[in-house]
Image (cartoon, grey):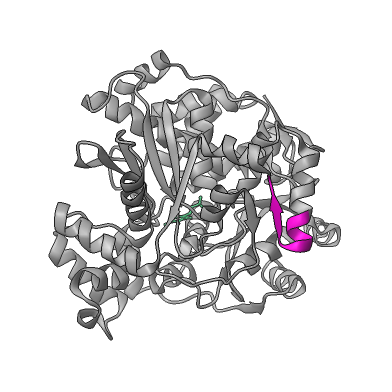
Amino acid sequence: MSFFSTRGNACASASQAILAGMAGDGGLYVPSLFPPMGADEIERMLTMSYEERAISVLSAFLDDYSADDISESVHAAYGNNHFNDPSIAPLKSLDGFTHVLELFHGPTLAFKDMALQLLPQLLTRAARMNGEEREIAILVATSGDTGKAALEGFRNVPGTSCTVFYPLDGVSEIQQLQMTTTDGSNTHVIAVRGNFDDAQTGVKSLFGSAEFNQDMHDRGRVLSSANSINFGRLLPQIVYYFSAYADLLAKGTIKKGESINFVVPTGNFGNILAGYYARNMGLPINKLICASNRNDVLTDFFKTGIYDLRRMFYKTMSPSMDILVSSNLERLLYESADRDGSLVSVWMNQLKTSGSYSVGEQRREWMASVFAAGCADDKETAGEIREVFTRYEYLMDPHTAVASKVLRDYRARTADDKVTVIVSTASPYKFAPDVAGAIQGEKAVRNLDAFSCSEILSSISGIPVPEQVNRLKELPVRHTLACEKDTKSMANAVKQVLK
Ligand SMILES: *Cc1c(COP(=O)(O)O)cnc(C)c1O
């Protein structure tokens, strides 16, 4: 299968697209077609393990990988007890038509593990297949969770290094400790004095800089990305949409062919885009509901067809969604433009030069036939955490609670009573102070650190504190480097750590 750039001027094989991370013309790689998975193929998944489901989805796209490469990669990622739940992505039911897909059972307690446990496998094989002998230098911008998941995925993987930029003061205490305590011979963590958008813009311009690429080449390195701009990040995420559907079928909650909704807490639009790709392959999805926090640029976009960056950036209790420039939306724009890369280029240039673009009413309507959208602020999010815990004794992290609240509002304003899956993206223990505060009241957690708040959560829910959190109390901080948010400072920081 070929992969095309969303800006229209690049073409690659699957392994080349994964190796490069981003297309040379500044665009993102998209598959030339969406391989169909019909109702019978989905039915066959009912009795498959998560790994077998992953192999069947991956094989449909990765036609230049051997069957052995794919199955070894999948087993290395999802086998070996890296996930603390045997079903990898378990589905929990709140009531007959509301289900939670838990994607946080991996080593770093966020859904990023679903892709980042697999990506190093796909990437190192892609390097071998394409005769790439330089070290693959992964550069990552993180809003909190990608960083640790990438560090964990690439730690000590031969032939790679992983350098993460995170916004100083923009991530939770646990998220920061998870990153700065990472060991391994090839991991680097750098704080940026700016927000996530600054970090992401900086990393993207490093990828685009001929001079920086040459400098890395002279050091025996080639750059690649572990952000969701890399198709290798999206592909593993398609799997769990099929898997959740198959689980609902197996339980008898839905009938063969019945369509369902997914509500997805969204930042960079990678998770929900994977759902859209699953839908294009034939998964019966009625609506994909895009849930945002107070940074509601996507809610406005789906309402008006205008993407407008010229607005305040807010820090919220769902920091992994504190994003204004949603990279993967570009891939949806490309479909909305009937795959006309030159039109996408025009919009992206307008965004760069004037801070906004408009896709027009017709394309807005086309998107609205598949996507619904809504947002929730911190007060509503905390209220939702409390409400869900009171009603179902189910603990949600703030990101998942944003989705749950947006679903509640969606149901109130539409007549849509279809079975809906809330995609749960993080363990509540990653954000223990906010979750405990939402349930017990802020006074009860004032002056308590994240570890004490984790104990509170454990005592009210009966779910033990994950050892990944407890361990952080003892681990030494290994990474303390910080840099300014301009590209030059970021480039110098990379040169410093990748001598
Ligand atoms: C990354 C992340 C998101 C946003 O996912 P996107 O693919 O960037 O839209 C939501 N919740 C959590 C917990 C995350 O880590």
Identify whether 145 is placed above or below 363: below
Q: Quadrant of the C terminus?
A: bottom right
Image location of residue 39, percent across then percent down: 40, 16
Q: Nearer the viewer, residue 198 or 225?
A: 198
Q: Quadrant of the N terminus?
A: top right
Determine whether, in the image, residue 223 is placed left or right of residue 259. Answer: right
Q: Nearer the viewer, residue 379 or 475?
A: 379
Identify whether 375 is placed above or below 31: below
Residue 405 included in the magenta stretch of the image: no
Identify whether 356 is placed above or below 486: above
Image location of residue 176, percent across then percent down: 45, 71
Question: Which residue is painted at 32% across and 18% down in the image?
Answer: 256
Q: Nearer the viewer, residue 29 or 472?
A: 29
Residue found at the very far bottom of the displayed protein: 447
Determine whether, in the image, residue 325 is placed left or right of residue 10. Answer: left
Q: Nearer the viewer, residue 283 or 204?
A: 283
Q: Is residue 7 visible?
A: no
Question: Which residue is painted at 61% across and 47% down in the image?
Answer: 329
Q: Looking at the image, how many numbered discs can be counted on the residues?
A: 0
Question: Which residue is painted at 46% across and 27% down in the image?
Answer: 55
Image location of residue 128, percent across then percent down: 67, 37
Question: Which residue is painted at 51% across and 57% down in the image?
Answer: 146
Residue stretch in magenta: 350-359
Q: Is residue 333 visible?
A: yes
